[in-house]
Amino acid sequence: MNGDITRSQEWAALGKHHEELADRHLRELFAQDPGRAGRMTVTAGDLYLDYAKHRATEETIDLLVALAERAGLRDRIARMFGGEHINVSEDRAVLHVALRMSRDARLVVDGQDVVADVHTVLDEMSAFAGRVRSKEWKGATGKPIETVVNIGIGGSDLGPAMAYEALRDYADAGITARFVSNIDPADITGNLAGLDPATTLFVVSSKTFTTLETLTNARVARRWLVDALGDEAVSKHFVAVSTNAEKVAAFGIDTDNMFGFWDWVGGRYSFDGAIGLSLMIAIGPERFREMLAGFHAMDQHFRTAPFKANMPVLMGLLGVWYNDFFGAETRAVLPYSQRLHRFPAYLQQLTMESNGKSVRADGSPVTTATGEIFWGEPGTNGQHAFYQLLHQGTRLVPADFIGFAEPFEDREGMHDQLTANLLAQTSALAFGKTAEEIAGEGTAAEVVPHKVMPGNRPTSTILAPKLTPGTLGQLVALYEHIVFVEGTIWGVDSFDQWGVELGKKMALDLAPALVSAEPPTELPDASTEHLVRRYRELRGR
Ligand code: F6P
């Protein structure tokens, strides 16, 4: 809808419903309707979602779905898949979904069949990855590649880094990947340590090829390589992934060794395209395509399933429910899989760079909270760190628990223990333990209040058979579409990121003041000036 959704009758109905439901406990909801456990589930591809442990009834879901209809979600989904310029502030189509369409699909956008373009690049990537994996591609000294170092930041790092960690059990060609992102020199120093230049391939990944961190790290990497093997080695040890051929050439990378993408792919939505090259080299083109098929399966579900049986729609709407009606500020994402240890960090960019906005797409200010704060750690590590606050703290933190039935490799029944922990936590969070129950166990009266577990803490549980390329694709697409649903309700442009620009520019302006021999001048504010002086003193300048 155009305008302010918080003034709609659907929003008002949810507000009223919240007043009725806010004080009801999940214990009560389950006691009154034990069948909700069987009903409040949905399957999409290999993913099974249990959303029964939410502070919601079927009426809540009906009201939320009505809100989605009012917000024009159905039409907006069609507009995204149709290639319309729904990224209004940058006047661009939003077509990460085209990155995983099948070869026989056709989607003409701005006069160009984007699916054909996607498959041309995928074929180029596959051919290159195949040559590296088969050792046909040799470094300058004739040795095959053993390590791929992706240099990128934000969407040009977090996606491939997360997915490589998730799928490293599938890296079967003896090639490992490393990821350098930070302009902190410790990052590249640490990642180059122990590497042999003769067997190292750098993939410089940057949509714009103007990003300070990436270009600086790439220069350091080139110096490291050239010092060992000479200038002529660069073409055998550097490839680029970018939308900007001119800048790639200016940097000194042969554009024959460049893999392209397009301005209709946002950085944080890009690792299923050329930005995933390092991942593809490690796990192979076939596994990569299985991952794309997983993404596509979730896209199809999102596009076609009725809203009440649509996993991203339900999870996005529940996000709005807690964020805007319960005042929850954050959502924890808790994968019970060590392999997904970078998943929360990846989601932070995906969700917060997308929906951390305070004006709507039409430029008017929003009138409700937007942009849930995503955070998390894998279980069971989180249990021994911050779960105390989840269980007994004063804040409401809805959480997504993610688990897999089968491990890649088990040891002494550890995987069942891991799953038992996931299930125990969601149950404890939902149902807690009352003072009477605790006193009944013989606990001293003065200790009882400390042991009370209030419960009524909502969770989603996502279960999949196994962490495979396919299920990872489904999982990532699920969250991409959750972002889309929430962004549509809030009316924001989920595909721009203007908020990151000012700080980048100011850092460039500030840098000379840190190294100059002159007294600092023209600093933006008095506090910054004091800090610059202090830094210079500490550095003896
Ligand atoms: O600063 C934010 C950002 O623009 C992200 O959106 C993007 O993923 C990242 O920087 C890296 O950009 P690039 O791929 O152009 O180097």
Image: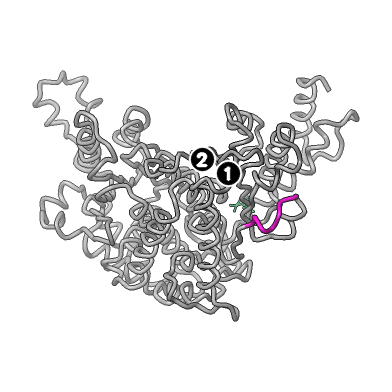
Which residue shows up at 43% across the image and 41% down it? 165
Which residue shows up at 23% across the image and 31% down it? 414
Pointers 2 and 1 in contact (C-beta within 8 Å): yes
Residue 73: x and y, percent? 41, 72
Q: Nearer the viewer, residue 1 or 100?
A: 100
Which residue shows up at 44% across the image and 76% down it? 105
Residue placed furthest toward the right: 518
Residue 287: x and y, percent? 39, 53
What amino acid is at disc 2? Ala
Callout 1: SS = strand
Residue 128: x and y, percent? 55, 54
Residue 150: numbered disc: 1
What amino acid is at disc 1? Asn
Q: Residue 96 vs residue 307: left or right?
A: right
Q: Dot 1, how many residues are within 10 Å of its Cα: few (below 14), some (14-19), or many (20+)? A: many
Q: Nearer the viewer, residue 8 or 527?
A: 527
Mark 2 residue CB less than 8 A from any atom of ligand 1: no
Which residue shows up at 62% across the image and 42% down it? 139
Callout 2: SS = strand
Where is residue 215, by image quadrant? top right
Residue 246: x and y, percent? 74, 60
Residue placed furthest toward the bottom: 111
Asked if the magenta segment contains residue 326, the reply would be no
Residue 380, placed above or below residue 396: above
Q: Which residues are magenta?
A: 252-258
Q: Nearer the viewer, residue 59 or 372?
A: 372
* Quadrant for the C terminus in the image: top right
Q: Dot 2, how many residues are within 10 Å of its Cα: few (below 14), some (14-19), or many (20+)? A: many
Mark 1 residue CB less than 8 A from any atom of ligand 1: no
Residue 509, placed above or below residue 94: above
Q: Which residue is mark 2?
A: 177
